[in-house]
Image (cartoon, grey):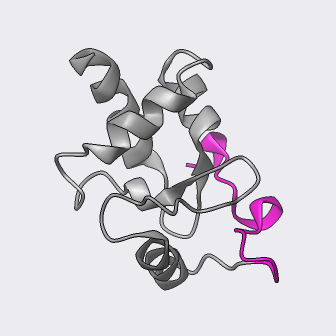
Amino acid sequence: MENTYQKIYAVVRRIPRGRVASYGQVAALAGNPRWARVVGYALHVNPDPAGVPCYRVVTQDGRISAAFAFGGGDVQRAMLEADGVRFTADGRVDMAAFRWQPEDN
């Protein structure tokens, strides 16, 4: 599992400030589109929060995690807003505007 987590962390490190990626998107870029749940597990035990910006990973429809490992959903939202990410009226990330496109990076 260690090698899998390292692949996931490598993808998450590439997500630039002001952008987000979905769990499924990270899974696909790490090598297996079926790893979305594994991405969640990996981010929950992220050994390097300063170097692996796990707060930039959200659900495919822009929801943040109520179980965000480093302080809860409010902390994740605040971190994303500090990056310049904006939310819709229903509290989701505006995925049309802020989804990371790897070819942009």
Residue 104 sits inside the magenta stretch: yes
Residue 67, how many percent across, how many down?
44, 58
7 up-or-down from 15: above or below: above
Looking at the figure, which quarter contains the N terminus? Answer: top left
Q: Is residue 69 left or right of residue 95?
A: left
Q: Residue at x 31, y 27 (%)?
A: 5
24 magenta-colored: no
Please tell me whether residue 50 is drawn above or below residue 86 in the rendered image: above
Is 83 situated left or right of 64 in this image? Answer: left
Residue at (52%, 30%) from the top-left corner? 37
- In screen coordinates, is 100 left or right of 69? right
Residue placed most toward the observer, 24 or 103: 24
Q: Residue furthest front?
A: 67
Q: Position of residue 68 (x, y in %)?
A: 41, 60
Q: Residue at x 56, y 70 (%)?
A: 18
Name the dominant secondary structure of the magenta segment: loop
Residue 85: % across, % down: 61, 76
For the image, the number of numbered tags is: 0
Image point 76% across, 53% down: which residue? 61
- Residue 16 position, x and y percent, is 49, 59
Magenta region, residue range: 88-105
Asked if residue 45 is positioned above or below residue 100 in the image, the reply reads: above
